[in-house]
Amino acid sequence: RGDAFWSIDCTADFCQAQNHATEWTGKIMSIPYFLSAALSPFCGHVVDKIGFRAIIASMASIILICVHLSLALLTNISPICPLIGQGLAYVCYSAVIWPSVPLIVSEEFTGAAFGAMVAIQNFGLALFPLVIAYIYTASEESYIPNVELFFVAFAVGGGGGGGVF
């Protein structure tokens, strides 16, 4: 047996703190997705009215570069502001990228183009966790800064690739 204080009170306090941290982290990590869900229709409406799809997509890439650089290099700040930026970048991309498909692909290839986009997206969703796990392990189980710099590289590549096309 052990001391009741340690086995009951301290364990309860520890578990309660762990639960609170888990709940708080879940709320913070959901910020980009809530913003995207709430704001994408409005941003889509704005894009339909004003256009400027290439500029908005470029701005989204710049926002993502700033977000991931801040998460990688400014480790003493709250992640809330960068995650708001990430959500806004998602909003911009979703309002620009998907509706652009019928504008740049002839009608007979629209379904194939959407299918290719979904395949590429799912390939990324399947591959990225594996690469991130490798980077994490190779970085002596440290997420910051290497994983975030990996995301910066892809944001730069995406912005550069978008500029080419």
Image (cartoon, grey):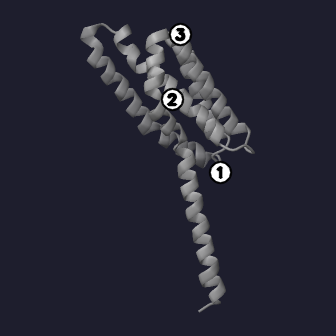
Residue beneath label 2, please? Answer: 90
Q: Which of 133 and 25 is in front in this view?
A: 25
Whole-percent x, y for residue 88 in the image: 55, 29
Residue beneath label 1, please? Answer: 140
Whole-percent x, y for residue 42 in the image: 46, 24
Q: Nearer the viewer, residue 139 or 9?
A: 9
Question: Which quadrant holds residue 66?
Answer: top right
Residue at the left extreme, as displayed? 108
Whole-percent x, y for residue 157 in the image: 57, 21
Binning the other alpha carbons within 10 Å of mark 1 as few (below 14), some (14 to 19) or many (20 upward) gives: few
Above/below status of 72 relative to 121: below
Q: What residue type is labelled 1?
A: Glu
Binning the other alpha carbons within 10 Å of mark 2 as few (below 14), some (14 to 19) or many (20 upward) gives: many
Quick one: SS at disc 1?
Answer: loop
Q: Residue 164 carries which label?
A: 3
Q: Name the N-terminal-most of marks 3 and 2.
A: 2
Binning the other alpha carbons within 10 Å of mark 3 as few (below 14), some (14 to 19) or many (20 upward) gives: few
CA gap between label 1 and label 2 equals 30 Å
Foreground disc of the pair 3, 2: 2
Q: Residue 40 carries which label?
A: none
Whole-percent x, y for residue 13 in the image: 62, 73
Quick one: SS at disc 3?
Answer: helix
CA gap between label 1 and label 3 equals 36 Å
Residue at left offset 61%, top offset 46%: 138
Quarter in which the N terminus is drawn = bottom right
Q: Which amino acid does label 3 sit on?
A: Val
Above/below status of 53 relative to 8: above
Residue at left offset 63%, top offset 27%: 65
In this rendering, does residue 11 appear at all?
yes
Quick one: SS at disc 2?
Answer: helix
Q: Do the residues labelled 3 and 2 touch (CB within 8 Å)?
A: no
Q: How many labels does the image show?
A: 3
